[in-house]
Amino acid sequence: MKISITILVLLASWSLAALSIFDIQYTTTPGIDNTYPSPYVGKSVTLEGIVVATNYQGGGFFISESISGAWRGILVLDRKYTVSIGDKVQLSGTVNEVFGMTCIQDVAQLRKIDSNRPVPQFMNVTTSQLIRSDEAESYEGVLVRVLNITCSQVSGPKGRFGVTDGTGQCLIYPGVFGDRTQRFSIKTGDQFSSIQGLLVYSFGAYSLSPRSRNDIAVMQPVFNQSTSWGRIKSIYK
């Protein structure tokens, strides 16, 4: 009987406090440092999501709601639990702001609901949407993709580089997942068909962080094969 009561209490504690990622992230208040802190800072919450990135440099992973969108992704800073991309998890922890980025810390419980779930689709955005804090904040922790872009700056701070699609320059911050020494060889004028990843806030700026080299698609040059004049003349013989 005691065991049954304990199980019921645990289940009730998990279900009653459940919030969506959107609930935790959404805010219109910029805060004193203009980083738009969560209204739940300092509070214990329970939430669930699909793991979309692991091995973040601070020791953690990102989760997303099943349908990606603004305010629907968040960082979980935790080294105790092992998760994989595609895991659907439910967890309890404390909402905090770490260097201006909303995250879940002090994870007390984590339960894997399912595995091999499809990763939500990336949101296509313009580079200008990832610059200003009043708009970029909504994409913090969210899977986003910029298209048809050109490298406009190679000497950005902390190994970051700038790209633009013509609407404004945003920053790309490679190497924050997995091997932190990994960097990309790039020069001004290099073109990409797309770069995708997670939008993070660090060192006072928003940056798009690819999860691996696979998230960077270089624009393939088009080569026109030279035509032999001898070949052309032979056609008209």
Image (cartoon, grey):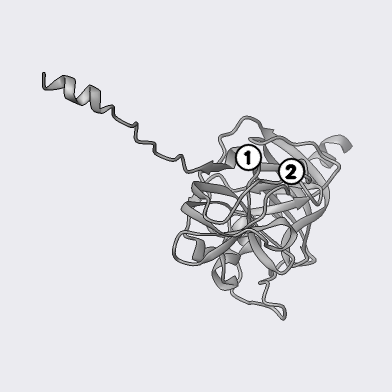
Q: CA distance from mark 1 to mark 2?
A: 9 Å
Answer whether residue 18 is visible to the viewer in this image.
no
Foreground pick, 113 / 145: 145
Q: Residue at x 52, y 55 (%)?
A: 189
Q: Give the residue type at disc 1.
A: Arg
Q: Which residue is mark 2?
A: 182
Q: Which residue is mark 1?
A: 213
**Amino acid type, label 2:** Gln
Q: Could you tell me if the residues under marks 1 and 2 are in contact, i.e. CB atoms within 8 Å?
A: yes
Q: Secondary structure at mark 1?
A: helix
Query: Exactly how many numbered labels are in the figure?
Result: 2
Q: x, y percentage for residue 226?
A: 33, 32
Specify the farthest residue to the right. 2
- Specify the quadrant that holds the C terminus: top left
Q: Callout 2: helix, strand or loop?
A: loop
Tell me: 53 left or right of 223: right
